[in-house]
Image (cartoon, grey):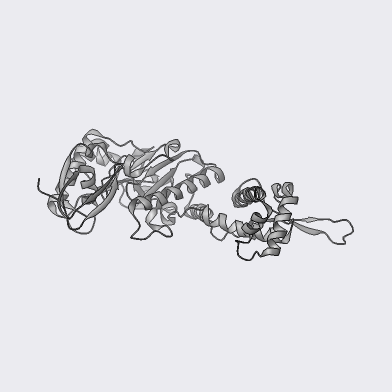
Amino acid sequence: MEERTRAYLRGRFRDHYRTVQPELPPNADEREWGYIPWTAGPGTTMVRHNSLLDLGTLGGFLESERPRHVYFSAGRYRNPSAGTMGEKDWRNADLVFDLDADHLPGVTPDTPYAEMLARGKTELLDLLDLLERDFGFEDMTVVFSGGRGYHVHVRDEAILQLDREARREVVDYIRATDVEFESVVESEAVAGIGLKNPTQKRTLPTDGGWGGRVHEHLCSFVDELLAMDEADAIDRLQEFDGIGSGKATGAYNAAKNNRREVERGNVDVHPAFYQLARVLAEEVFSTETAAVDEPVTTDTHRLIRLPGSLHGGSGLEVTRIERDELIDFDPLRDAVPDTFTRHDVTVELEEKVEIELGGESFRLPEGNVSTPEYVAIFLMARGRAEKGKE
């Protein structure tokens, strides 16, 4: 990045912070604060071990320093500005989840930015479903990171004291690490008339957890199956590996004749039906998990981006999202700072660019180009353009 570009971005970040002040997190004076300035060179320098008192007022600090990135700690401390973690005297920490869309399966460096963020949002919805339904968390803040994905801050009182190992167990659950169908199936002995020894009846729990999720998916699939013509339903069953014509017929008849037992969680209504339940369980374990970044969640001292600040790698705002507004949230429209929407500026492009931003699509040619400032700042911050001469 050329000095002219860096100076321009730093100045415009200052202009933004003159009119917009991020909201402080709870217990802001007990947290460590850090930031990355607009330094020259390819690397970055993190300035940390600051308390809020060291920074002064947040608004005054942001306007005077004009940082490239701003962070606060998930942890709360008695001495947040101390130079070592031991001296800080840790008290407790938020439970933080980080979803980076560029780390998701199938996302490559060639995946369009908009498509990548859409994948990240889908993953976020899966994560929130797990946190709300399976854990019952209520005090959650959802944030678009301004860059590659989303953050979720959980501040329920019951989790603040969790240590690293307990937080790792939460991650393992969310990822369904080492969860298998047999581990969620419950067995009970059932005495049969005329039988010398009791038999085993295998059931899925219906009251939550991964077993409950498998049961829910299984019942939904059975309802879908029974709404079809029998021939179509048997064809549908044969789409699964290991289920041929005979097993498909057996599984279909078992589902049709034992719908109430299936509703109760019974998966032993037929051997082929048990196999079907196992196949559907694998679908649940692969599609309803969330690919959270384990080191972020397990780190009780982690620094995380400040909602309301600007992301120095995109010029977008680190945006807090209300839960009921999440479905309609579009980061490439709703995280564009209003400060940068008022005029056009000139940038220098070494190659042509196609980009979706601010609800519009842009096709920019190589060379000096005049474009809306939010597009220019996005490209400059990402290293794809330099500030041009007006």
Residue nearest the observer in this picture, 296 or 182: 182
At 73% from the left and 46% from the top, the residue drawn is 260
Position of residue 234 measured from the top left corner of the image (x, y, whole percent): 66, 58
191 sits to left or right of 377: right
Rendered position, 373 above or below 101: above
Residue nearest the observer in this picture, 377 or 9: 377
Position of residue 280 measured from the top left corner of the image (x, y, whole percent): 61, 56
Residue farthest to the top? 19
Residue farthest to the left? 389
Position of residue 162 measured from the top left corner of the image (x, y, whole percent): 49, 48
241 sits to left or right of 382: right
At 45% from the left and 36% from the top, the residue drawn is 324
The answer to whether any part of residue 79 appears in the image is: no
Position of residue 248 measured from the top left corner of the image (x, y, whole percent): 68, 60
The answer to whether any part of residue 63 appears in the image is: yes
Residue farthest to the right? 194
137 sits to left or right of 46: right
Work out which quarter of the rendered image holds the C terminus and state it. top left
Rendered position, 155 above or below 295: above
